[in-house]
Amino acid sequence: MLVLAIESSCDDTAAAVVEDGRKILSNWVSSQIEVHRKYGGVVPELASRRHIETIIPVTLAALEESQTTLDDIDGLAVTRGPGLIGSLLVGLSVAKSIAYVKGKPLVGVNHIDGHLCAVLLESANLAFPFLGLVVSGGHTSLYRVEGVGKTHLLGQTRDDAAGEVYDKVAKALGLGYPGGPIIDELSKQGSSKIIHFPRALLSSKTLDFSFSGLKTAVINYLKAHPLKPVEKDRLIGIVSGFQEAVVDVLVRKAKQAARQERLERIVVSGGVASNSHLRQRFSEMAKGEGLEVLFPSPRLCTDNAAMIGVVGYHFLQRGWTSSLSLNAFANLPIPPDHVLE
Ligand code: KG4
Ligand code: ZN
């Protein structure tokens, strides 16, 4: 089964052709980083305008690379939320138009299910259930995943997402955008003095996260101890201490969740899952706990359409389709059983 998948929930315009839910025939992502860089974060109105300009060329490129045409495609999968509403509507409109004109089945997919199932593109025989941690610019959440699209929320951030805090701390330090990869690289250089920052909700039983206090702590530290451009060692000490605080909380809450839910496998996905220190700390924790930990490769951790195609394939196989009145929702929750409209 060939699925054409479209994803436009935030600042990446993406289209992919996926065969039988496991083989990527093409996976095109047009990044808008250059559009948003000078603002230090995604500007929703600019994002939707850029999606409108790039969605058709990206979709055509994905078809061309996979050497398929719209007639060869067996069905369409499209992200219907959560995300920026103006951005989501661009991808949704294109997918609905193709489905209508070509008479192909269409299915709406939750972006989070996409992140959680991206791993199936590289580990097709992965056994369920597993603990899923989605950690990105928009989300930091833990799930019990029983099957494709059978996802139960265990805990989530009560304020900022981890990636958002990476970006804001990098902005406060004048390091550029997006902050995650910059802080990741800087931290690898090592510092003689790592600054300690607070970890929220660690002693509590909750599987929720909170990162806004950490962001404020870094900003307050910088106000109290301004950083001079020559102080490279201190800069690295600050970003390493910040990163350690983020990763520490993610690892400890995931360990707590795996124990509580008696799960033997952890899948970590989303943009922040590309982080090298996070991967190292999760691997160490998993070894100590006798768990298996899997990370999709970095290009499948960040937003892409192939991950939407995997979920779409499984839904279409089950005969689950959406109607042409399918709508997008900025705050689409993960329901235990999917509402496809
Ligand atoms: O999944 P993604 O591409 O988009 C969202 O759905 O948000 O994630 C983007 C986020 C940004 O906040 C970026 O700073 C962060 O992922 N990120 C990283 C790394 N690479 C990207 N954070 C930490 N370390 C990285 N290597
Ligand atoms: Zn995402």
Image (tube, rainbow, N blue to C red):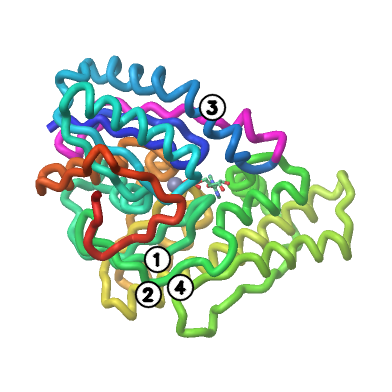
- Label located before the other in sequence (1 or 4): 1
Inspect the image, locate mark 4, and give the three-letter code of the amino acid beneath it.
Lys
Of circles 1 and 4, the one toward us is: 1
Q: Are marks 1 and 2 in contact (CB under 8 Å)?
A: yes
Label 2 Cα crowd, 10 Å radius (few <14 / some 14-19 / many 20+): many
Q: Which residue is mark 1?
A: 142
Above or below, 120 against 221 in this view is: above
Inspect the image, locate mark 3, and give the three-letter code of the amino acid beneath it.
Arg
Magenta span: 19-39
Q: Is the residue indicated by label 3 positioned so its CB lies within 8 Å of ligand 1? A: no
Inspect the image, locate mark 2, and give the three-letter code of the amino acid beneath it.
Ala
Which type of secondary structure does the marked residue at label 3 adopt? helix
Q: Quadrant of the N terminus?
A: top left
Q: Which residue is mark 2?
A: 257
Label 1 Cα crowd, 10 Å radius (few <14 / some 14-19 / many 20+): many
Which type of secondary structure does the marked residue at label 1 adopt? strand
- Tell which of 109 and 202 is nearer to you: 109
Q: Which residue is mark 3?
A: 50
